[in-house]
Amino acid sequence: MAERCPTPDKKRFATAEAAHAYALQRELALDTLLHPYACTCGWIHLTSLPQVPPRAEADPAIVNALRHASHDVFAEAVEADASGRADMPARIALRAPRIRGRWITTLRAINARLDREITDRPASPAWRQRAEVFRHHVQARLAEAERLRDRERAA
Ligand SMILES: [Zn+2]
């Protein structure tokens, strides 16, 4: 059951779609990433995360560790980034061109898994809401990764 909201002053959204549409609009005006999350109160709020600087230098040690990481470890890094839990050095490293292909493949696999889970599972509304918010993050990262790849191909 929904609990009392710890941040009652925050804007409330009923669906992941509505929160993301609002976030995308506002992000153009602000220099932050607006990150939707499912609150314990049953609504979706936005929190701001710093943007990954476009030309930031990745730490080669982190990039290498990711390159050689097992499937599960890599997927966990991708999920942490998508859900806003990763720190900035990890977020920058994940965007390194050398692991771009693996990032995209992993995002597609996570997205497909979420599609299946959301369709197949007779889940609670709270579970479904969290899964839909997360799927939006994964799809936003996928769009970002493909944009970065296409920009490099064009250069
Ligand atoms: Zn709340």
Image: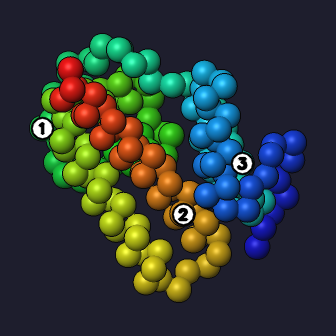
Q: Examine the image and state in which quarter residue 103 appears.
A: top left
Judge whether 81 appears above or below 131 on screen: above
Residue 15 placement, left or right of 71: right
Q: Secondary structure at mark 2?
A: helix
The percent position of residue 30, horizontal first and vertical second, equals 65, 24
* Rendered location of residue 76, percent (x, y): 33, 48
For marks 2 and 1, give the CA distance: 30 Å
In percent of width and height, residue 33 lies at 57, 32
Numbered disc in front, either 1 or 3: 3
Q: Quadrant of the C terminus?
A: top left
Q: Around disc 1, counting alpha carbons within 10 Å, would you say few (fewer than 14), some (14 to 19), or many (20 or more)?
A: few
Q: CA distance from mark 2 to mark 3?
A: 14 Å
Left or right, 146 with respect to 97, comes to right
What's the distance in space between the residues labelled 1 and 3, CA to CA? 36 Å
Across and down, in percent, residue 72 comes to 24, 53
Q: Is residue 143 left or right of residue 7?
A: left
Q: Which residue is mark 2?
A: 132
Q: Is residue 148 visible?
A: yes
Residue labelled with disc 3: 45
Q: Is residue 147 above or below residue 155?
A: below
Image vertical order of residue 41 relative to residue 91, above or below: below
Q: Are marks 2 and 1 in contact (CB under 8 Å)?
A: no
Q: Kindly identify the residue that appears in the image at 38 percent across and 38 percent down.
A: 144
Picture quadrant of residue 52: top left
Q: Earlier in the sequence, mark 2 or mark 3?
A: 3
* Residue pointed to by mark 1: 68
Q: Is residue 7 visible from the viewing direction of this image?
A: no
| Amino acid carrying mark 3 in the image | His
Q: Earlier in the sequence, mark 1 or mark 3?
A: 3
Q: Residue furthest left?
A: 68
| Residue at image point 53% right, 86% down | 122
